[in-house]
Image (spheres, rainbow, N blue to C red):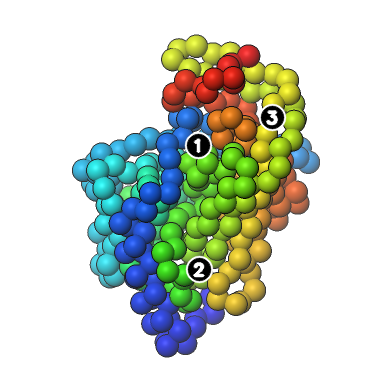
Amino acid sequence: MTHPVAALRAIGGVALAAVLASAASGVETLGPVSWRRVELGASKLLLSATTSLSVQRLPAERAGALLRRVPEGTPVPVPGPEVIALTTDTALPFGRHEVTTVLLDPASGAVLQGDKLVTGRKPYQKVFRYTREGFFFWRAAPASPGEEESSPEGWSKRRARLVRAVAPLPAGAVVTDSYALLYLVSAAGLNRQGSAFTAFILADDQPVELRFEAGGLVQQDADYQERRAGDSRRRRGPVLLRTVVVKARALSGQPGGGDVDLGFLGMRGGVRILVEAGTGLPVQVVGRTDAVGELTVNLQAVEWGVPVLAGHPAR
């Protein structure tokens, strides 16, 4: 990693402190999502992957117990009485398995902490506790083949440090996490015509702008399972969908914004998401990966948290 000069690092840290302070106060931007869990899958070139995203609302006391204490920096505080916990569970090719849990402010989407555990080939765990300056992270991995059989607590190859942002963010910006993309598409109401949403992520020490923009409507066949209150039905046939485009742009002026890891099945840079026009349910994601090029990921199942809106019953 190329380290910036001390002056630029200081400017970025001061600006980010103000931004995260305003984000933590809870700007009323997002609403509740109608789904509790979605399951998606993709296959290409004899390779396949599946992923699920679950949404849970945690009381502040429970969320606070999950947050790590940082030895350096000022941690972003719990913003209110509840915190959103997003858990992504992904089965990747070649036996790799990844589970990531992200804690967010439900009002703004601001991130408090991310915890990522990869098992299988080259296992490791990373925890990111977001701070006024950027984030403090811990990384653990097995130091020998014998350690791979133990839990992350038994892994002895460790490092930890505070990462500071290298460029200032706009006033009032929200720093979120790349693993929250599908949740943010629904929570920001991007199934509505003309809607847009802007958030920022930290790719290492580079702030990156994520711009979500709702486009036109398309009708496309879908095939997925709907679950609700013990009932399960198959929905097949044409569905009215809204196109949402997500674009990444690095704020530092350095190249690499288009190559940002978006935390979704290895996709990098921008993605196109099709959401159900009535509910905001993500039905399809199309993006580019280093491994297989363009990849299309389709919804396989949804568990609804509330009744589906009128006019969009299960079929």
Location of residue 264 in the rendering, given as x and y in whole percent from the top left corner: 58, 47
Q: Residues within 10 Å of mark 2 (few under 14, many from 20)?
A: many
Q: Which of marks 1 and 2 is in front?
A: 2
Q: Is residue 315 left or right of residue 61?
A: right
Location of residue 42 in the rendering, given as x and y in whole percent from the top left corner: 68, 36
Q: In this view, does 29 lie to the left or right of 211?
A: left
Q: Looking at this view, is 239 or 122 the one in front?
A: 239
On screen, 91 above or below 179? Answer: above
Location of residue 95 in the rendering, given as x and y in whole percent from the top left corner: 59, 40
Say what amino acid the circle numbered 1 marks. Answer: Leu
**Mark 2 lies on residue:** 207
The quarter of the picture where residue 49 lies is top right
> Quick one: SS at disc 2?
strand
Q: Looking at this view, is 195 or 45 the one in front?
A: 195
In the image, what residue occupies the spot 46% across and 71% down? 169
Gap between marks 1 and 3 measured at Cα: 22 Å
Q: Nearer the viewer, mark 3 or mark 2?
A: 3
**Mark 3 lies on residue:** 240
Discs 3, 2 touching: Cβ within 8 Å: no
Q: How crowded is mark 1: few (under 14 residues within 10 Å), some or many (20 or more)?
A: many
Residue 99 can be seen, yes or no: no
In the image, what residue occupies the spot 33% across and 50% down? 153
First in sequence: mark 1 vs mark 2: 1
Say what amino acid the circle numbered 2 marks. Answer: Pro
Say what amino acid the circle numbered 3 marks. Answer: Leu
Q: How crowded is mark 3: few (under 14 residues within 10 Å), some or many (20 or more)?
A: some
The quarter of the picture where residue 20 lies is bottom left
Discs 1, 3 touching: Cβ within 8 Å: no
In the image, what residue occupies the spot 61% across and 66% down? 249
In the image, what residue occupies the spot 78% across and 41% down? 45
**Mark 1 lies on residue:** 53
